[in-house]
Amino acid sequence: MADLSRRSAHGLRLVVVTVLALLFLVPFYLLIRNGLATEADITSPGWSFIPKALQWGNFQELFSDPAVPMVHALWNSGVVAVATTAGTLLLASLAGYGLARIEYPYATQVFYAILGTLMVPAAVTFVPNFVLVSSLGWISTLRGLIVPMLFQAFAAFLFRQYFLGFPRELEDAARVDGLGHWATYWRVVVPNTRPVFAAVGTIVFIGSWNSFLWPLVIGQDRDAWTVQVALAGFTTAQSVNLHELFIAALVAVVPLLVVFLVLQRHIIAGVERSGIEG
């Protein structure tokens, strides 16, 4: 009886997980289905699970559309996301290491001040950041999209929590060999903390890639559009280009899926060891 009960519970969990997984896959199905359909297939009152004829030419139409520079937007998003991720990892990891390991006056107060910035709504700092970027002449430049996004308190907090649990014996051995804080961080700490770098890097990359409002305001010229701004270009006051919008959204999602699938093992390990799982 107990064995039957366990099998029933296992079967029930399997059914629930399967249903939830299918629900999460519905948006991806809609992207693929509508992206490879015609306008008539998308807007038709009669729904078909798969369009009668898949429109593979929608990809060519997307990348050759003169109204929306999709290729250039993808390139801009890639540059901005990679540069923002690399810069944030460097600055946040240094800040986190300093907060966790280097003793100095008012260290606790500095840490709480950094945490306090997490409570400030982004809308409050949006206008001052725009005024600063505008005064520097960075409107419609990649610098204006990247530099203000490099300083992220949450990333520094994650690194600090991770470094608190880092084995001090390794750092003590490095200091015995004559290494200072910087050399210890670069030659000992970084090579042994890849999971948290992967976890934080993935979070920052996804956030940067999906960012819309800041690139929309700063990227006023078409040459500075990111992929999210380009997606908005398919929706105008006069018309909505549905099939190109869906195929463009599908193309925009692919880099995120690749990054997540490649780094998912490190992401899970990094979050588990960062001290925030509870």
Image: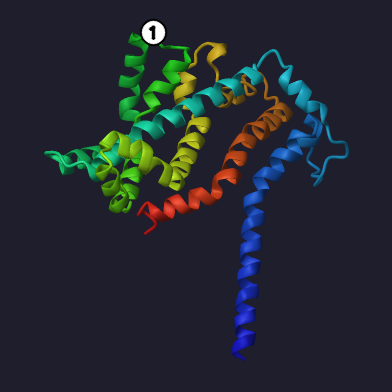
Tell me how many marks there are: 1
Give the vertical position of 210 relative to 140 (above or below). Answer: below
Residue 133 position by quadrant: top left
Question: From the viewer's perspective, is 61 left or right of 235?
Answer: right
Picture residue at 69% right of the left edge, 32% below the top? 246
State the quadrant of the C terminus.
Answer: bottom left
The colour scheme used to paint the residues is: rainbow
> Is residue 251 or residue 258 the one in the foreground?
258
Q: Residue 240, position in %: x, y? A: 67, 25
> Is residue 68 or residue 209 the one in the foreground?
209
Q: Residue 196, position in %: x, y? A: 42, 46
> Is residue 112 or residue 219 the one in the foreground?
112
The residue lying furthest to the right in this view is 52
Question: From the viewer's perspective, is 154 left or right of 70?
Answer: left
Residue 272 position by quadrant: bottom left
Q: Residue 213, position in %: x, y? A: 46, 26
Give the vertical position of 32 relative to 228 (above or below). Answer: below
The residue lying furthest to the left in this view is 105
Is any part of residue 130 visible from this angle? Answer: yes
Question: From the viewer's perspective, is 211 left or right of 188?
Answer: right
Give the vertical position of 236 relative to 193 (above or below). Answer: above
Determine which residue is flagged by label 1: 137
Picture residue at 36% right of the left edge, 42% below the top? 188
State the quadrant of the N terminus.
Answer: bottom right
Three-letter code, disc 1: Gly
| Disc 1, SS | loop
> Is residue 148 or residue 234 the one in the foreground?
148
Give the vertical position of 229 relative to 276 (above or below). Answer: above
Q: Residue 266, position in %: x, y? A: 50, 49
